[in-house]
Image (cartoon, rainbow, N blue to C red):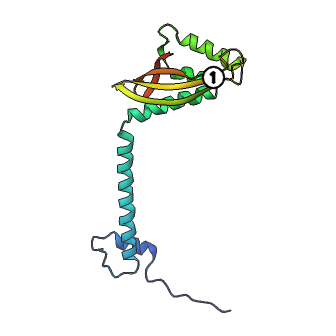
C-alpha cells in the first residue's frame, strides 16, 4: 500500500484568522496571506460603509416632484388598463370633478365606459406636472379618448385635462379634476 503525503500548510485558516486579529498586523506583515486578507477586509469594510451611507441618504431624501410624476404615471397606467378600483384608490376622499362631480360619479363613469366597451382607451398625448405648494401639485395634460362606439365623440380630439393633487404623507391623491 502506497501512501501519499502532502506537505502540511504553513498555517491553517483558523490560525491565520486568530493571528490576524492581533494589533501587530500591518500591510507589511510577511506572513503568507496576511496582506491579501487585510486588503480584502479593508475593501469589504469600506464598501459596506459606502453602501450604508447611500442607503441612508437615498431613503431619507424626499423627492415630491418624482413622487407626483409617479402618481400621475400610475393613474395613467390604471386608466389605460381599465383598473377602476386602483383609480378609485388614488382619489382623495373629497374628490371633485368639474366642481360638482364626486367619487361616486367617477366610479359609475368608469364602470359604464370600461364594462360596456372593452375598446375604450385613454391616451395621454402630453403631460407636465409641478409642485404648487408643500402638499399640493398639479398636472396639465392633453388626453384622447378613443373606441367608445357611440359613447364618445368618434373623431378623437384632444381634451385639456388639469388634475390637482394633494399629498398626504408620501401618497399623492387626486383631489380635483377639471377639463375643457
In the rendered image, residue 94, in percent from the top left (x then y), is placed at: 46, 12
Residue 119 drawn above or below residue 20: above
Quarter occupied by residue 121: top right
Question: Closer to the camera, 167 or 17?
Answer: 167
In the rendered image, residue 2, in percent from the top left (x then y), is placed at: 66, 92
Describe residue 143's horizontal placement relative to residue 170 as left or right. Answer: right
Visible residue check, residue 177: yes
Helix, strand, or loop for circle 1?
loop
For the view shown, which residue lies furthest in the left direction?
24
Which residue does the numbered mark 1 point to in the structure image?
A: 156
In the rendered image, residue 152, in percent from the top left (x then y), is placed at: 65, 16
Residue 50 drawn above or below residue 90: below
Question: Closer to the camera, 87 or 124?
Answer: 124
Quarter occupied by residue 19: bottom left
Describe residue 19's horizontal placement relative to residue 152 as left or right. Answer: left
How many numbered discs? 1
In the rendered image, residue 51, in percent from the top left (x then y), is placed at: 39, 53
Please give the name of the residue rendered at 62% of the width and 17% of the height, measured from the top-left corner: 110
Please give the name of the residue rendered at 27% of the width and 74% of the height, measured from the top-left corner: 24
Question: Closer to the camera, 83 or 157?
Answer: 157
Visible residue check, residue 86: no
Circle 1 residues within 10 Å: few <14, some 14–19, many ≥20:
few
Residue 133 drawn above or below residue 95: below
Describe residue 34's horizontal placement relative to residue 81 as left or right. Answer: left
Please give the name of the residue rendered at 58% of the width and 31% of the height, measured from the top-left corner: 77
Question: Closer to the camera, 45 or 93?
Answer: 93
Describe residue 127's horizontal placement relative to residue 154 as left or right. Answer: left
Amino acid at each position: 500500500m502506497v501512501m501519499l503525503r502532502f506537505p502540511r500548510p504553513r498555517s491553517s485558516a483558523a490560525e491565520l484568522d486568530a493571528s490576524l486579529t492581533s494589533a501587530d498586523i500591518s500591510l507589511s506583515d510577511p506572513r503568507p496571506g496576511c496582506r491579501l486578507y487585510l486588503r480584502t477586509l479593508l475593501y469589504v469594510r469600506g464598501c459596506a460603509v459606502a453602501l450604508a451611507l447611500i442607503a441612508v441618504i437615498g431613503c431619507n431624501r424626499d423627492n415630491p416632484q418624482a413622487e407626483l410624476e409617479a402618481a400621475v404615471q400610475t393613474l395613467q397606467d390604471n386608466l389605460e388598463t381599465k383598473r377602476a378600483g386602483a383609480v378609485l384608490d388614488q382619489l382623495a376622499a373629497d374628490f371633485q370633478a368639474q366642481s360638482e362631480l364626486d367619487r361616486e360619479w367617477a366610479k359609475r363613469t368608469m364602470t359604464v365606459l370600461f364594462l360596456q366597451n372593452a375598446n375604450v382607451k385613454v391616451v395621454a398625448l402630453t403631460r407636465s406636472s409641478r409642485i404648487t405648494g408643500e402638499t399640493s401639485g398639479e398636472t396639465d395634460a392633453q388626453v384622447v379618448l378613443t373606441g367608445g362606439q357611440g359613447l364618445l365623440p368618434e373623431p378623437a380630439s384632444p381634451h385639456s385635462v388639469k388634475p390637482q393633487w394633494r399629498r398626504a404623507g408620501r401618497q399623492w391623491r387626486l383631489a380635483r379634476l377639471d377639463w375643457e
